[in-house]
Image (cartoon, rainbow, N blue to C red):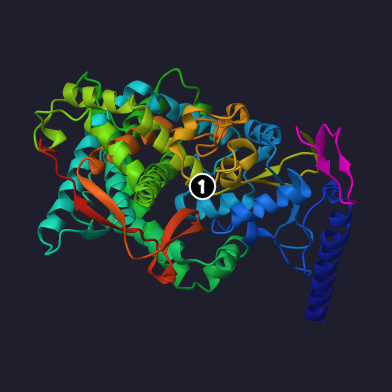
Amino acid sequence: MALLLALLASVVLFASFAVYYLFIVKYFNPLRRIAGPPVRTLFGNHLSAVLDPKRSPVVHKHLVEKYGRSVRIRGVGPWDDRLLTLDPVSLNHVLKNSTLYEKPWQSRRLITSLIGCGMLSAEGQMHKRQRRLATPAFSIQNMRALIPLVFEKGDQLKNRWKDTMDSSTTEATTVDVCQWMSRATFDIIGLAGFDYNFNSIQDESNELFMAYKEMFDKVIGKSSFWGTLASVYFPTLFKIVPNQRSRIIERCQAVIRREAGNMITEKKRKIAEGEKCGKVYQGKDILTQLLTSNAATDIPPEQRIDDEEMLHNINTFMFAGSDTTSLTVSWTLYLLTENPEMQERLRADLLSVLPRTAPSNFSDLTEEETQSVYAEIAELPYLHNVIREALRLIPPLHSTLRVATQDDEIPVSYPVHRRDGSVDESAQSVHIAKGTFVHVSVEAFNLDQDVWGEDAWLFNPDRWDNLPEKAGEQPGLFSNILSFSAGPRSCIGIRFALIEIKTFIFILLTNFVFQSSANPIDKVNVVLTRPFVKKQFGKGSQMPLTIKRYVRSEQVL
């Protein structure tokens, strides 16, 4: 009898939820008044169309042309009406009001399950506390002090590629640029972030590097959309009945957690030893800066972060500080292989600042000399244009999601298309209810032909010398694009990322000529926009490019 009552209660509860979500929520949602594309089935959705970078530019263009810039789309079920907006005023409102629009629990659960609750997933006071403590570590002065380290790792990568070419019997060699760049940027974030030498350019055997690589390349990089969705909505199921994916993630996280904990312990020991000797520990790495800021006497106890949060942010820095930068450099080189005349033009500019009487490696220069070389590189207009254009065309983060924490009126600057076919030319805002998801399509925003011109989908660095008026009015932390986001949650490491990108492009282009390989490349949205060889998804993210030595009469580094 008890079992029967329990089953009956379960059925009633399920039916109540079904009625609530399928009828009450759905039919009283104010977004129902907004126009949007139809769905063919009860549980049909538009997510695969708007999140797939291979077809999303065409999809977003169609949506805007037919339904305007404030579009209702279907999420994971018939109860899940969402707002997709390409109105710059609306996007600015959503991204700048981070307390009104948070990352939804689904996104936070996915991020937290991989890298913990650091700055990428924390919300509210926790995020403010973490960011406030981290901001001094990312000052201009601290980032510039790391320039020689970036040059050193650029040299190491260049030399490894030259060694590979020396052992080859052909003039040209194919290298997986994506994997090599991942190793290089991981080395940099290890030393710059935690004073930890992964040495992965030389040797991939480091346990922490291998755990991170396996978790993201071999597991996350091969996950299906629906598999990822299941892990977000039913995490307990995978704990009770673990599959291969969940077991690998758990094993890798145990290694990452152990090693990150050791980093914190060792740094605290060095700082404490310095205090005992009356000397301040002079570590330049981000972790030292965080621990020092956290221990400052003027920080109230409630503003400090504990070791657990510190550990989560180490994981966050490893992810954000390596993957996004390595992908940007990889995609930039790919675009330059597709446009060889632009590659030649950029190389000529880079060679103009190359020291005429230079040693074989930049690491042989003094710190002052290295800083001087970078200062010249950083001011090259065409290099800056190439990087801005690559970030605009292929942003590392394809799109992001926010959820309204309360009812709100989102301001609009374009007419709103209604469900009944009418167009409200005088609309001032779109009303949304608490709990409504808002899609922020970074790629679609960056590729908007109404803003950037008819050639917005093409790689054209020269556009930055004569931008359309509308482009100058777009929100964005960097160059009026959303590749580094905008508002309080914008990228805290943008200065260091640009140092890395410019330095790697400089060293690699002045030593190698890049050409397309025989393998066509696809863009695939797997946490970030990653390159995959067509029809080889099972092999994980790859970007094979053909390289040849660049030779000129003067010595090249």
Question: Viewed as shown, does residue 66 lie left or right of 388?
Answer: right
Question: Viewed as shown, does residue 44 lie left or right of 252?
Answer: right
Q: Quadrant of the C terminus?
A: top left
Percent coordinates x, y for residue 322 in the rendering: 36, 45
Depth check: give the residue in front, 207 or 84. 84
Q: Quadrant of residue 272?
A: top left
Question: Viewed as shown, does residue 228 lie left or right of 547?
Answer: right
Q: Which residue in the protein does label 1 denote? A: 397
Depth check: give the residue in front, 418 or 245. 418
Percent coordinates x, y for residue 32 in the rendering: 85, 51
Q: Secondary structure at mark 1?
A: loop
Q: Is residue 435 visible?
A: no
Q: Is residue 375 visible?
A: yes
What are the residue bounds of the magenta stretch? Answer: 412-430
The residue drawn where x is 38% and y is 48% is 339
Q: Tell me if residue 408 is in the magenta stretch.
A: no
Percent coordinates x, y for residue 491 in the rendering: 48, 35
Count of numbered labels shown in the rendering: 1
The residue drawn where x is 77% and y is 64% is 39
The residue drawn where x is 24% and y is 48% is 513
Percent coordinates x, y for residue 51 in the rendering: 60, 56
Kindly identify the amino acid type of the residue bearing the numbered disc 1: Leu
Please, what is the dominant secondary structure of the magenta stretch? loop
Mark 1, Cα crowd under 10 Å, few <14 / some 14-19 / many 20+, is many
Q: Quadrant of residue 8?
A: bottom right
